[in-house]
Amino acid sequence: MTSSAAAAVIFENVSVVREGVRILEGVSAAIPRGSATAIIGPNGAGKTTLLLALLGNLDYSGVIRVLAPREDRAVRLGYVPQRLEFDRGMPLTVMEMMVMGRQRRPLWLGIRPALKQQAAAMLASVKAEHLAARRLGALSGGELQRVLLALALQENPDILILDEPAAGVDIGGESLLCELLEQLRRQRGFTQIMVTHDLSLVTAHATDVICLNRRVRGQGPVATTLNERVLEATFGIHLGLADICKKNGLHNHSQDKEASHD
Amino acid sequence: MIDLGGLYDLVGRALPVECMQARFMQQALVGLVMLAPMCAAMGVQVVNFRMAFFSDAISHSAFAGVALGLILATDVRLTMIGLALLIGLGIMAVGRRVNISVDTVIGVFFSAVVAFGLAVVSRDRSVARDLQRFLYGDILTVGAGEILAIAALFVALMTFQALAYNRLLYLGLNPTLASAHRVRVRAYQYTYAALLSLVVIFSVGAVGVLLVTAMLIVPAAAARNFARSAGGMFWWAMLVSITSAIAGLLISAQSWARTATGATIILVATAWFILSAVTSVLRRR
């Protein structure tokens, strides 16, 4: 593959079988370095599964190669989950969440001022600086998503992985989030991998696309890849307009027997 | 062996009440002010990880530990510790691999250790009294050797808490997110399970099988209501556990009370919890 020299991630013949159900079948795809690649497909197409395989969180066959941009250190990932499942009653402030992965000194002995400053700057970059003292469980869907983005960015990732970033975010917040991501990607030069079933998001904010429905149904730059034939193979229904795609994305096709995996 | 006589005398002078002049009371207090905060600190994560049932299974393995000690004709304390570690790490290992609910995995281990203990005891009636001692526990009979063992565990555990508190919080928030962001989830999970098993089995002698989980859960649950931050939750858990332990010990020794120490400590902690729940409700208004 000629694009592999400039690829950030390469999937080679990746298959996942869970409880006897084939969720992914021989997925081979490349994600170009520095791109904003969207993985699209209907519910149950295996999008989240592919991300979890990439994160090393489930067993798969085949090879996933994550290529380091520099040889002197391991690849750093940033992950923004779809809907973070957590205990909302947990007394944990946004600031504490930001430093808990970076500071060794226990939080009950205080937060180091330098880390606090860095975390505040990071929160400011996602327009969430006013949330620092709030409890994580008290945030709205959009606020939580932005804070989780700050947490992932703080890893200074080479690859930023987002699972349905717009889920649970209102429409205004959705485009705000996407514009923010685009701006950050330009500034920091990370590769962005975003799972979504929302085609309007892809056409507006992604550079590349992988169309997934158990198998790869099409991949490449958005402009040349998203044609009627590919969309029909991916979503299984003849589609014309992006907003119809969105509706049909929620409508499950008969071959996707497994529940959506979140 | 290290002589703790000076420390005990100090306790007697610091608490100049009649009941605290007896050596066994001073020893009990020293043991409790180490056990209670250990349990409370680990309890913060027990609550965050929802592992109450896990600690129940470990404490009930005490029965099987005693039974095993009798069969092998060795020191029951060793078999209790060994079995607790085995069960704790076993639950963690199976729970990480098998695709069924962790509750179910723990339930199976729980039933197995209780059944094994009962089976052995039913063969030999004289053992029943031994087991009863572990059912209710008695902090007033801890020996000097046990105090030293508790002190060693105290140092190890508090060091672990100081080093791992933040990462354990990450795990409690969401393990998938933690592992994506380079937290060594598996290492922390196993170390935590092993230390929790040790704390639980050491506490069985003090408060008994039935109340160990309460020592872990109640101060942490109260702390969760009082605290506004994860750092604060730790200190609230310390405050509630230590004051409950001291007050419980003193009350249980009064002539008007004469109650079991372990149970009295838990009752004081429960009073703290009720206060915390009221505080939390009032704050939300």
Image (spheres, coloured by chain):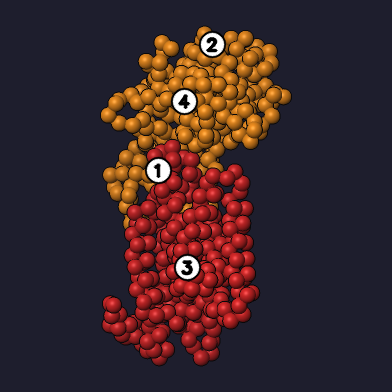
Chain colours: A orange, B red
C-alpha separation, residue under disc 1 versus residue under disc 4: 23 Å
Q: Counting residues from the N terminus, which is met first, the one under dot 3 or under dot 1?
A: 3
Q: Nearer the viewer, mark 4 or mark 2?
A: 4
Q: Amino acid at mark 4?
A: Val
C-alpha separation, residue under disc 1 versus residue under disc 2: 37 Å
Q: Which residue is mark 4?
A: A63
State the SS at label 2: helix
Give the x, y percent position of residue A100.
38, 47
Determine whether label 3 and label 2 are within 8 Å by CB: no
Q: Which residue is mark 2?
A: A225
- Check if mark 3 and mark 1 are on a common chain: yes
Question: Looking at the image, which residue is at 61% across and 48% down?
Answer: B101
State whether residue A43 is above or below residue A154.
Answer: above
C-alpha separation, residue under disc 4 versus residue under disc 2: 24 Å
Q: Which residue is mark 3?
A: B79
Give the x, y percent position of residue B189.
45, 50
Question: Looking at the image, which residue is at 33% across and 59% down?
Answer: B159
